[in-house]
Image (cartoon, rainbow, N blue to C red):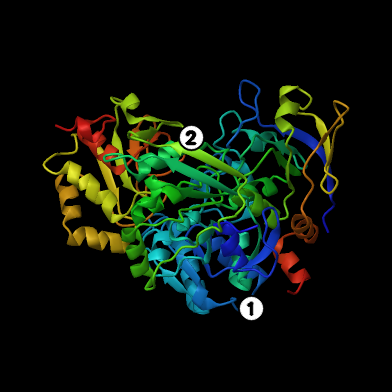
């Protein structure tokens, strides 16, 4: 029988036989740790492997994105622990100026198609957008990977998700992703590798591919791949990698545990209401829900086009008085491009709060937290109770967040007059 | 070397209606506000600190207790602390119908006994497993005994890799035990 995408990538990194359910020992091309998890990796390493070299320093990285620059003493200490270890061992640090680690690894050409990348970020599988097997791991796993360059892994089953039909703006990749969260929940692709196919995903931009693949984590999947790739995304990924982009395609006779069809014809904008990313409804059903704040950014919606779309809707309009709109580009490179094209200036003029790159909207270290009673609409990927604070978080596309911040309640672009 | 069976009092993580709580994420297990803590011994008081109805768990738990939770336990972030906080409390075994992949790996690599139990929902619904019951689990045969209710159940036995890591103590010790 032929192999699925995940089986092909793992097979290229192991001498063991690859089949669903088998546990193999596999090579890891890139090993990384963040300012969260990283300090524990250093601590583990110095306890377990004192004086022993890393498997390969050129394949080992730190990425600081959680609390950047440090705004608590504890994070300042923790980041310095990692920096000191990195200097001592000749490891490169993408420091607090860089942005979201997964995006930085992509932009630096380190996360490559058909490669394997691990780090202490549970959204590491976002790299499926590039045809890379990315996987988030805990600090014990990553310490072992730093030292040995390998890990054990249970080959997951694969499931094919066929998206039928197409949709048009203002419906975006985020709306598609939220709709899939509703359709697939946390059970259908749990602990499996998903391959998304169909016209609705084949033509997605790189930003759209990243949006979809980032939230496979919230679907409880191991990773998601999009084997078809349009020319635009292909070009952008190739530029970062400085090599032509060719993701692996599954064999025609590859084995899938299940094939799931989801109809997305004429899909309208979607919103995930608290308390979970799978609690998704059409945005129109929630129209009028009062908000206090908006957030655009995160690994899910922190690319140039996400902010350009918000700026387009905010042009000539103002964020409603009393509403906070927080803007956090994914990386320094995205920030630079937004500056160059005048997008940040437009967002600023509309009343938005523009912040430096990082993992805002998700973790406690960056902006995007909510107080008790506060209602936030966010382009992030999680709205679990208490995740960003005691407030309520709704998940939506950049267009819906921008429109909502103008109106002061959940709204769509069509509500803007 | 760790022993491959455990007996202890079980806590069944149920909601107000008595059903197993599903999709308990790592922010409910060990909130990100405490991620700066790097000493395992200090993590115990925060275990389940953001899970409605169970915030007092660290006060109620005693060493050797067993936890049973609903499916997709440990969803969310990769934080090792979500496992380490139970190690700090000396929890003996963690059972659920399924776990998030990262969470399961973190537990396995730490040598913490984590086992899938497909019939957990049925046991809880049928009231043949309740908080306070004295339970014994064999990690290798998958045999489970509820000594309070005089009933039996099965769990998925440890895989070879999980068993070997567990026997050695953790992934680091296991790594030293073989040369590949």
Q: Tell me residue A215's x, y (percent).
A: 46, 46
Q: Quadrant of residue A108?
A: bottom left
Name the side, left or right, on which B36 lies relative to A72. right
Q: Residue A290: horizontal and vertical position, in percent?
A: 29, 27
On the picture, is A225 further left or further right than A271? right
Question: On the same chain: label 1 and label 2?
Answer: yes
In the displayed structure, B46 sits above or below A147; it is above
> Total label count?
2
Left or right of residue A321, residue A385 in this image: right
Please give the name of the residue rendered at 69% of the width and 38% of the height, measured from the top-left corner: B97
| Residue A52 - label | 1
Q: Quadrant of residue A375?
A: top left
Crowd class of label 2 (few under 14; some 14 to 19; many from 20; radius 10 Å)? some
Kind of element beneath mark 1: loop
Query: Given the current orientation, which residue lies at the most extreme front position?
Result: A252
For this rendering, which residue is in front, A316 or B42?
Answer: A316
User: Is label 1 in contact with label 2 (beta carbons under 8 Å)?
Assistant: no
The residue wearing badge 2 is A183
Tell me which label, 1 or 2, sits earlier in the chain. Answer: 1
């Amino acid at each position: 029988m032929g192999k699925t995408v995940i089986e092909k990538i793992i097979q290229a990194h192991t001498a063991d036989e690859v089949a669903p359910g088998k546990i193999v020992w596999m090579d890891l091309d890139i090993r990384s740790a963040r300012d969260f998890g990283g300090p524990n990796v250093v601590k583990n390493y110095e306890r377990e492997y004192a004086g022993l070299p890393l498997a390969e320093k050129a394949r080992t990285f730190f990425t600081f994105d959680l609390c950047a620059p440090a705004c608590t003493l504890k994070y300042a200490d923790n980041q310095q622990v990692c920096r000191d270890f990195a200097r001592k061992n000749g490891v490169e640090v993408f420091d607090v100026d860089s942005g979201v680690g997964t995006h930085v690894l992509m932009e630096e050409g380190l996360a490559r198609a058909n490669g394997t990348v691990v780090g202490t970020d549970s959204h590491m599988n976002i790299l499926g957008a590039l045809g890379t097997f990315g996987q988030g791991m805990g600090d014990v796993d990553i310490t072992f990977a730093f030292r040995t360059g390998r890990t054990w892994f249970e080959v997951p089953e694969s499931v094919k998700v066929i998206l039928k039909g197409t949709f048009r703006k203002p419906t975006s990749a985020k709306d598609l992703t939220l709709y899939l969260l509703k359709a697939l929940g946390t059970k259908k692709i749990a602990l499996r590798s998903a391959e998304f196919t169909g016209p609705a995903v084949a033509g997605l931009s790189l930003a759209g591919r990243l949006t979809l693949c980032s939230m496979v984590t919230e679907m409880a999947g191991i990773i998601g791949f999009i084997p078809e790739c349009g020319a635009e995304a292909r070009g952008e990924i190739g530029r970062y990698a400085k090599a032509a982009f060719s993701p692996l395609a599954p064999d025609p006779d590859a084995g899938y545990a299940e094939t799931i069809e989801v109809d997305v014809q004429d899909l309208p904008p979607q919103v995930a209401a608290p308390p979970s990313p799978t609690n998704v409804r059409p945005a129109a059903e929630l129209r009028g829900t009062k908000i206090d704040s908006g957030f655009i950014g995160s690994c899910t919606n922190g690319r140039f086009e996400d902010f350009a779309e918000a700026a387009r809707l905010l042009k000539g309009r103002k964020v409603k008085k009393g509403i906070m709109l927080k803007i956090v580009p994914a990386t320094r490179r995205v920030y630079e491009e937004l500056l160059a094209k005048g997008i940040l200036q437009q967002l600023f003029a509309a009343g938005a709060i523009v912040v430096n790159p990082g993992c805002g909207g998700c973790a406690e270290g960056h902006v995007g937290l909510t107080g008790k009673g506060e209602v936030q609409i966010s382009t992030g990927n999680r709205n679990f109770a208490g995740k960003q604070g005691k407030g309520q978080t709704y998940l939506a596309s950049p267009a819906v967040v921008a429109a909502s911040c103008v109106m002061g309640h959940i709204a769509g672009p069509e509500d803007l007059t | 070397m760790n022993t491959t069976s455990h007996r202890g009092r079980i806590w069944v993580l149920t909601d107000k209606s008595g059903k197993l709580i599903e999709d308990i994420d790592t922010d409910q297990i060990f909130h990100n506000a405490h991620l700066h803590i790097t000493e395992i011994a200090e993590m115990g008081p925060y275990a389940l600190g953001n899970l409605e109805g169970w915030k007092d768990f660290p006060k109620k738990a005693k060493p050797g207790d067993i936890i049973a939770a609903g499916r997709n336990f440990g969803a969310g972030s990769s934080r090792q602390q979500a496992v380490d906080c139970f190690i700090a409390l000396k929890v003996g075994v963690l059972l659920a119908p399924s776990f998030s992949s990262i969470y399961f790996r973190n537990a396995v690599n730490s040598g913490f006994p984590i086992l899938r139990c497909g019939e957990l929902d049925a046991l809880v619904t049928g009231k043949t497993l309740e908080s306070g019951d004295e339970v014994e689990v064999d990690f290798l045969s998958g045999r489970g005994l509820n000594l309070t209710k005089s009933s039996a159940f099965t769990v998925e036995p440890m895989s070879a890799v999980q068993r070997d890591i567990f026997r050695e103590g953790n992934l680091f010790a296991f790594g030293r035990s073989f040369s590949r």
